[in-house]
Image (cartoon, rainbow, N blue to C red):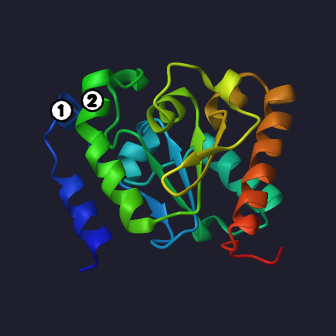
Amino acid sequence: MSALAALAAEVATCTRCRLSESRTQAVFARGAPDAALVFIGEGPGAEEDRQGLPFVGRSGQLLDRLIVEELGLDPGQVQVTNVVRCRPPGNRDPQEDEIVACRPYLERQLDLVAPAVIVTLGNFAARLMLDTTQGVTRLRGRTYPCRGGVLVPTYHPSFVLRNGGGDQLVQMRADFVRAKQALVAAGRYPGRA
């Protein structure tokens, strides 16, 4: 068993916080175990909790479409995960103690995958990874050094869908292009540049 598979098995039986009490199953990740690019969202929704995979609902469809259209990659070439691995009841925001309980899993996952580029989707992931209280609206539009690579903050796909696309979708597309440029600059772009 690979170290990443062992970590996924550990997450599957985690009871570090109250989210474990109401989950159907823990949601670890989907995509390439050695991805040069990792997307980090907030937490699983109802469909993710049911299937055991992150970003498989409408938000995931938009995410996958942008991966293809703006990055020129197959979604299987990247890795997609979340800050918390169990669905918060009623799709509420994850609470601080839940994020703290799950953070070691995310840190170990990133150590094992060692991506060149991390794209955070929404406020929770951006604030956690950049250790800031600023929101994604202020953070997006540039890159930040992170874990020996680059971090690109952008909107959460569900936020873009709720707001009907528009300017946020245009900005999100620009952020994906920024992530592609960072992958190329790092010599880790897995497609044809």
User: Is residue 27 shown left or right of residue 13?
Assistant: right
> Which amino acid, by three-letter code, is at mark 1?
Cys
Point out residue 16 in the picture as x, y percentages from the top left corner: 15, 38
Image spot of residue 101 (x, y percent): 23, 36
Residue at 45 percent of width and 30 percent of height: 131
Disc 2 or 1, which lies upstream in sequence? 1
Q: Is residue 15 above or below residue 165?
A: below
Q: Position of residue 29 (x, y in %)?
A: 42, 57
Q: Is residue 180 above or below residue 90?
A: below
Residue nearest the viewer, comparing 142 with 156: 142
**Residue at 74% of width from left, 22% of height from top?**
163
Which residue position holds label 1?
17
Residue 98 badge: 2
Q: Is there a contact, CB below 8 Å, between mark 2 and mark 1?
A: yes
Residue 32 higher or lower than 11, as above or below = below
Marks 2/1: CA–CA distance: 6 Å
Secondary structure under tag 1 reads loop
- Packing grade of label 1 (10 A; few <14, some 14-19, many >=20) is some
Question: What's the residue type where badge 2 is placed?
Answer: Glu
Residue at 28%, 61% in the rendered image: 8
Compared with 88, 133 (above or below) is above
